[in-house]
Amino acid sequence: MKKAQTLSRGQRLVLLAPYLWIVAFLLAPLILILKISFSHTVLARPPYRPIFELSEGLAGFWTKAQTFTFDAYRVLFTDSLYINAYISSLTIAAVATLVTLLVAYPFALAMARAPEKWRPFLIGLAAAPFWTSFLIRVYAWIALLKDEGLINKGLIALGLIDAPIQMFATRFAVVIGIVYSYLPFMLLPLYAALERQNPALREASADLGATPMQTFLRVTLPLSREGIIAGVLLVFIPAVGEFVIPDLLGGSDTLMIGRTLWNDFFANHDWPTASAAAVLLLVLLIAPLAALERMRFGQKDLRP
Amino acid sequence: MSLTTVSGSGSAPLLSIQRVSRRYGPVIALDDVSLDIARGEFFALLGPSGCGKTTLMRCVAGFETPDSGELLLDGEDLAGMPPYRRPVNMMFQSYALFPHLDVFENVAFGLRRQGLNKETIAGRVRALLQLTQLDSYGSRKINELSGGQRQRVALARALAPGPRLLLLDEPLGALDRKLREETQFHLKKIQRETGTSFMIVTHDQDEALALADRVAVMRAGRIEQVASPNDIYERPASRFVAGFVGDTNFIDGVVVFDSAPYLLTDFGRIALSTCCLPDGRRATLSVRPEDIHARHDGPGISGIVEEFVFRGDNTLLRVRVGNDVILRVATWDMRFSVGESVMLQFPLDTPALFAEEI
C-alpha cells in the first residue's frame, strides 16, 4: 500500500476519527456480544458467567476464558425453534425484498422519467412516510388488515367475499409490513441509478432495432444494477432482523429471529443463546453482502 | 465488400423530406422544410445551434414527430414507424455507447436484434472493427477507450445493421483539432467504401465543406441554400450563408446602372458582373478576403494597411478604405507594413450581391 504511506499527519488524524468511532460504538459492543455468546447461563445479575474484572490481571483472564463453552451455539443448531426462526426470517425477508423491488422499480422508473421540475417533489413524496412514526404506521396496517379491518369490510361490501380473509397475524401481513416500511430504502437508490442514465442510451438502443422491452432488458435494467444491489441490501439486511413488524403484524406463529432474540434476552434471560443467535445472524448476513459486493466489482464477465 | 448496401435503381431520392414543420410551444424548430437526399450521397446539414438541424435529423431517426409534412424513405412513408423499425441508424453526438458492454457487444447490439446467427454476427463485427481500425479492441470496455476510439466504436455500431441512411450528429464535435482532420478523411473513405448514404449534422462549416457532396445551410428552422460545397462558398444564396460559411467582407452600397452596373460605396465604385437588382437599390456585396487583390501600386481602390496578421500560408491585412470601412484582405505578398497605402482590386465576378433586407 504505497498510497497509504503518502498520507500526511493531518490526513491520518482525520482518518482516525471515524475509525475510533467504529471501534467504540460498533466493534466494542460486538466483541461484548461475542464474549457473552461463549458464556454460560446462571441465575444471577447479569445472568451469565464468566465476568471479567480488570483487577484480576492476565492470569485471571486466562482461567476464566477457559470456562468458555459452545453450548449456546449447540442450542442454535439442535433446537428446531432457532433453525425454523432463521429459515423463516430469511424466507420472509427474501420474499419481502423481492416484492419491494418489484413494487419500487416501476415507481423509480416513473420518477426518473418524469419531467425534471417534478422530480424533487416526487422524491419528497417518496420520503413522506418518514414524517410520521414508524410504529404508528405499522399500527395503521393492523386496522387495515384485521378481520373487521378496512380491506375485509370493503371487500365484503363490494360482495367479492362472504367471510373475512385472514390477513392479520400471518406471514403475508409481515411481508406487507416490510414492503411498506422499507419501500423508500429501495426506491431512492433505484431512482438514483435510473436518473443518471443517459437518455441517449435508450435512443441508441431503439435506433439499433431494440423494441422498448428489449431496451429495458438489455440497457436500462443492467445499467441500474448498482441501484438494485444497494436497494436489496438496504431492505434485506434490516428485514432479516426485523422485530417490530413481525411482533405487531405477525401474530404468535410467525417466528422471526428478531423476536426469538428478544424473547431470549428479556423473557428467558438466556443471554448467551441470544448473543449466539445474534452472532450467527451477523455471519448469515455478511455472506450475501460479500457475494453482492463481489458481483458489483467483478463486472467483467457480464455478457448478455 | 460485404458492408455495401444494395443501391436501388432509378434516380428517385433515397430520403425525401416534404414540407416538414415542427414547433415546441412558441418556438418554431422546423418551418416547412423540404429536402431530397440521393442514394450514396454524403449530405451535410449545416447551421448555427438552434437552427433546427438536429430536430430534422431526429425526425428522420424517429425520435421526434413532425407536426406536419412527410418523410419518405425509398418512397415509404416513415410516419408512425417507431425508431426501432426504421432502416436508418444514428451516430449520436455523445456517442451513447453502452458502458456495460464491451466494444464487440456494442457493435453487435444492432445485429443481435436482427436475430442473426453467431457466426454471421462475429464475422460482421470483425469486419467493422477492421474498417474502423479497432481490430484488437473487441474486448475492451468503453471506459478504457480514448475519445477517438469511442468515436470509431460509435461509427462501427451505427454501420453494423447496414442502414440505408446513416445519420451522424456532430460526429467530430468531441475530437481535438488534429484528430478531427484525420477523422474527416477516414469518414469519407468509409462512406465511399460502404456506399451508405450519410447525413451529417454540424455547426462547423469547415467540416461540412470538407466532407459533404451537398450542403444544406439552415437558419431558424428554414433551409437557406442547398448546393455543393463549392457553390455554397462561391455563390452563397443569402447574406446569412455568405457570413456563416467562410470569412467574408460585407460591403454596403447602392446599385447604379451606368453603361455597366456598379455598386456605389462610401469609398468608391465596385463593378458588378451580374446584377438582377434595380437601379438605386441599397444592397450588400459579399467579397471573400482572398478574392481581393492588394498591390503596392496600379489601378484600384486605395486604402491604408491598419494591421496585418501572419497566418502561415498567407497574411491577413486589415485595410482601411474611405473613412471608416475596414476590409479584410488575404495576400501571399508579405511586403506590407502598417500605415502603408495599398491599391485594392476587386474580383470581376461578383455573384454574392444581396438586396438590403427590408
Image: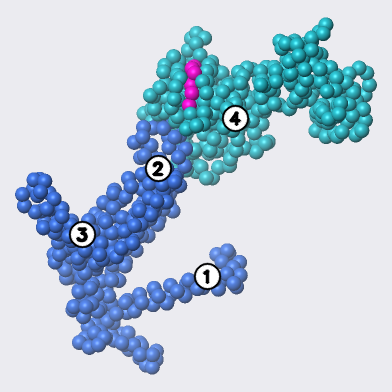
Chain colours: A blue, B cyan
Local packing at callout 4 (Cα closer than 10 Å; few below 14, some 14-19, many 20+) is many
The three-letter amino acid code for the residue at tag 1 is Leu
Question: Which quarter of the figure has residue A148?
Answer: bottom left
Label 2: element kind: helix
Q: Which of marks 3 and 4 is in front?
A: 3
Q: Is residue B18 magenta?
A: yes
User: Compared to B322, does A290 lie above or below?
Assistant: below
The three-letter amino acid code for the residue at tag 3 is Trp
Query: Which is nearer the N-term, disc 3 or disc 2?
Result: 2
Q: Name the residue under label 2.
A: A113
Q: Which residue is drawn at 34% across and 79% down?
A: A32
The three-letter amino acid code for the residue at tag 2 is Arg
Q: Name the residue under label 3.
A: A141
User: Compared to B262, does A261 lie above or below?
Assistant: below
Q: Name the residue under label 4.
A: B202
Q: Name the residue under label 1.
A: A15
Q: Nearer the viewer, mark 1 or mark 3?
A: 3
Part of the protein shown in magenta:
B16-22
